[in-house]
Amino acid sequence: MTLHELDTAVYAHQWVALAGDHVAGVGQTGPEALRLARRNWPKQKQFTLRYVEPEGGEPLLIPPLLEQLLPFVEQLDQPIYVVGGAVRDMLNGRLPHDLDLMVGAGAITCGFRMGDFLGAPAYVMDKVRDVARIVLAEQETTIDIARQRGESLADDLRDRDLTINALALPVAARTSASVVDVVGGQADLANGLIRQASPNALLQDPVRGLRVVRMSLKLGFAIEAETAANTRLSLRLREATSPERIRDELFNLVRVDPAGALRILHELDGLAAIVPPLAPLVGVSQSAPHVRDVWGHTLWVLEWLGQVEAAVAGQPCSPPELGEWLAPWRDELQAHLARPVPGHIDGHLLWRWAAVLHDVGKPATKTVEESGRIRFFGHDKVGADMAADFLRSLHLSSEAVNHVAQTVAGHMRPLLMTHEGHSPTRRTIYRFFKRAGKAGVDVALLSLADHLGTYGGVGDGAAWHRLGHIVTQLLRHYFEHYEETVRPVPLVSGRELMKQLQLPQGPDVGRLLAILEEAQAAGEIGTAEEALALARANFV
């Protein structure tokens, strides 16, 4: 049979070895087809390999990395598939960022061979499950290669969480006709539906329940009724898995859409199990100017957070003053939020978590005055402790926990500054950052979303512009006058202080240095002589 007479119905999903235009061999892999071709055509010196796809498929958006892998795949003596989200993305016309590949056996060995072919390092991810990872630093992408679970490809796909993730594509394939779909994932993808791959798929692992929420948010898909019911059950199994796995999936949710994620978790009765500090917020009423209960206010703050983020990114935002106020320090704010934090996270994620948890102290501090006015005295401090306890339960680093706790503890301070009726003094700004540290930047940004989430918009225009003035002053001093107002360069050292005042080493030295630092930040002293004079006046 010649190439032009090739019967795709006969050879579909297989490799053929061609001698010119003639089919010389066929097999499940390139090497298998070549072995048969050499046996059938012993005098032929050269053969061309081709993977045959069924007719009728649509061309897929293939990432360049798969094209790069084709010569490697041609020499691989077992079938290899792209699986999961990458296939879903290609069917949706999107280029996948990372790749999950699957082979029948020897995944770690295959991974190291592939890494060598690509000139990239490979690592053992899971020796027991036979999983390897290749890291392509320049492309900022990874390839995970795993051994199939079960006796066949179909068994593996049926064991996955969602139908839209239970899809496979031969690495050499280029059209939708080659997609392996044993549970109706393509139909659910076309219909915008999140459906479990099997009746027990979600009950094996609470992380799968969180993944249902994330996929619904990410794709804008509805959750099928039985899948929603099993997601409810799955979320209650939090204690059945490690805090780290819950944390990582929660972080993914907050990265995608924090307000949407929490709303779905609430609808699925999952708040108490997954984010316990948030569950008591539902139904806790508040007095004016709040127009929603604490839960509704929290969701609003998270929605308005997106407008603050747009302003930081230099994108159109509402209200437009956000962009005007933050524009002078846009680059600095972007760098602040993008800074790496231990645990493979960044400052942006911590800021979002502070917004999620900023009012968790309100239910425990709620009081009602005789007039009926509702108060939450001390909710910022109580909430900071609750936020810290929750994040520690997820095994976050101390740096991450402390930063979020400081942001929650300080989230009321910009508002309180607006009540003073004048521009914040240098001393006030110094004390603000002395307490908050670099979390003060997060506090300033969060206060804007907090105001908007209180009124459902600008509301009290005068209060809004007073807050804007406070925020811009805080940011100006932090980014432009750091060594003058926020953390002044000492005029005298502790050693010099001890020498000039004949002080022994002890707490008095630290106390005097703190007095001098605040006075310097306030602009009251500016030379070493003035510093020593003030120290003498305060030494008893």
Image (cartoon, rainbow, N blue to C red):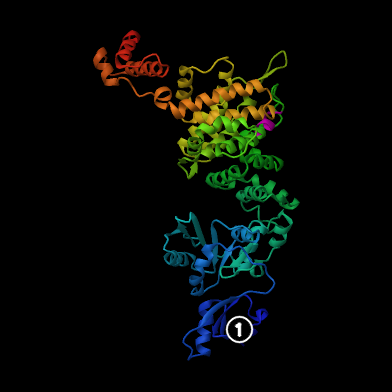
How many dots with numbers?
1
Q: Going 74% across and 57% down the picture, which residue do you hit? A: 191
Q: Amino acid at mark 1?
A: Leu
In this view, 84 is above or below 228: below
Q: Which residues are magenta?
A: 292-298
Residue identifier under label 1: 3
Q: Is residue 363 left or right of residue 420?
A: right
Picture quadrant where residue 182 is located: bottom right
Name the spot of residue 354 as percent of width and height, x first.
56, 33
Horizontal and vertical percent position of residue 458 = 67, 27
Left/right of residue 227 with respect to residue 512 in the rendered view = right
Quarter residue 28 falls in: bottom right
Note whether residue 297 is visible.
yes
Which type of secondary structure does the marked residue at label 1 adopt?
helix
x then y, percent, for residue 475: 50, 28
**Residue 208 within the magenta-colored segment of the rendering:** no
- Along the line of sight, which residue is nearer the eye, 406 or 283? 406
Q: Out of 167 and 481, give the one closest to the viewer.
A: 481
Quadrant where the N terminus sits is: bottom right
Q: Is 358 placed above or below 103 here?
A: above
